[in-house]
Image: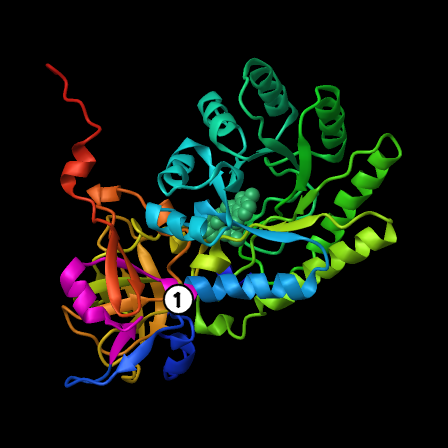
Amino acid sequence: MAEMAQAGSSAETPEVGIDVAKRLALFPVTTRLRPGPGGERLQIAGCDLDNLAEQYGTPLYLYDQATLDANLETYQQALSRAYPGPWGVTYAGKAFLCVALAQWVQRRGLWMDCTGTGELAIALAAGAQREQILAHGVNKSAADLISELTAAGTIVVDSLVELDRLTRMIARTDGPVPDLWLRLRPGLAVDTHSHTQTGHEDSKFGMGEAEALEAIRLCRLHNLPLTGIHFHQGSQFRDPTPIGPALEKALDLVVELRGKGDWLPQVLCPGGGWGVPYHEDDLPFPSIDRYIEFVAQRLADGCLRRDLPLPRLQLEPGRSLVAQAGVAVYRVGYVKYTAHQRWVLLDGGLADNPRPALYGSRYTALPVRAPQRPSAGPAWLAGPYCESGDILIQGLHFPEVEAGELVAVPMSGAYQLSMASNYNGACKPAVVWLRDGNSHLVQRREEPEDLLRRDVALAEV
Ligand code: LLP
């Protein structure tokens, strides 16, 4: 339950130094300290963070392509080592999607999980091919289903009601029909914050066993291309153990069907959800290899024991591919002291990163200039928004910083911008892609005019 950890008040927090090496380990793989006149400075992909902040403004989100590639390679190598059958990787677009990231996904040959028409539009704008697009969602709207039938290669069916709607729509179309997978609700969640558990018995997602059996019967009856079984037990977990019994349940279902006919899933997808360390106290974090070995071995053994052919193992990570690639850069407005706390007030927070407020996520940070400075005691890093819950990091050991300095927050690539809001009329930050010493603006900063674009004034009030 790493997400739940909270720092205590300054009075309770022991006076310890900052383990800068451990904090740096959470930054992108290309992060370096560049010596300079006023002390060392943080650099990512050969770009100085202070120059980037000057050029693009703050708050600023940076994505390092080398880290995306490194994380993907870890997945691909572990899968090819650990799983004797065919395999694939789907990027869960809900973690973060913009056209540039979707282009990266597309060019690397990954599949793309899109939830809803909006994410689908981004994937298509990036040139994603039909067979790469997989549509997810609970309570998909009619508009979602229509666009997914047209553009997606696979639709993951969440319920019998949805299957019925899809069956009618498919009967009326003469275009190609996407493959269908069934989303199971295995009745077992992973150990994580309750807001991000999805596999438990009373989860709103997916189908129980009886519904799934009925769905399979209906697909066969209507001759629909049912090719896969999917489940996702939750996100930001570090112990893969609950995936074992969920896989067993899925394979038992297949065996039960074998007795009644000859349907076999070509694909089995145990979702995504592998976690990341957000804070140095989360280190050492178990490796992606360990997670993949566990899943691959359980699936291969389970199939062997039941005399089933190996399905394609499709993993669906979001966060563990993109979180480490992303860094949020803020500028300190000023420092304020209250009865017991030192407040480092930043120009972003809750609006671009609601995760601390929503899940109690505990982040860490370093100043961009001279990050090796000693701790001046615990600090409360907070944003400018009108809510006391707008605290990015509570009680973090942090150096003395001045107004105007820059602060970098690592592990900011997942579920921050994709859940960002316009609270207090906040404009969403710019996103800059870093590669080989070059920076590319891939999403411009929102302007107040963007906030006004949807509004229609009344003729009279
Ligand atoms: N597949 C399905 C069906 C999912 O629902 C999700 C995440 C994933 C894959 C990818 O999970 P990941 O590998 O990214 O953990 N807003 C929360 C996370 C919600 C996750 C929703 N589903 C957070 O900020 O932690």
> Which residue corresponds to the image point at 76% horizontal and 50% vertical from the top-left?
310
Colour setting: rainbow
Question: What residue did someone put label 1 on?
Answer: 66
Answer left or right for 224 relative to 130: right
Residue sitting at the far right = 259
Q: Where does residue 47 sit, x and y in percent of width and height?
A: 25, 71
> Which residue corresponds to the image point at 30% horizontal and 71% vertical from the top-left?
44
Q: Secondary structure at mark 1?
A: helix
Q: Quadrant of the C terminus?
A: top left
Answer left or right for 365 relative to 455: right
Q: Residues within 10 Å of mark 1 (few under 14, many from 20)?
A: some
> Which residue corresponds to the image point at 89% horizontal and 34% vertical from the top-left?
259
| Residue 403 drawn in magenta | no
Q: Where does residue 86 sit, x and y in percent of width and height?
A: 67, 53
Answer left or right for 308 relative to 418: right
9 shown above or below 105: below
Q: Tell me: is circle 1 under 8 Å from ligand 1.
A: no
Compare residues 312 and 239 and report the one nearer the observer: 312
- State which quadrant residue 80 falls in: bottom right
Residue sitting at the far left = 460
Answer left or right for 241 relative to 340: right
What is the span of residues highlighted in magenta in the rendered image?
Answer: 41-67
Compare residues 185 and 126 and report the one nearer the observer: 126
Q: Where does residue 82 sit, x and y in percent of width and height?
A: 69, 64
Q: Quadrant of the N terminus?
A: bottom right
148 shown above or below 186: above
- State which quadrant residue 74 falls in: bottom right
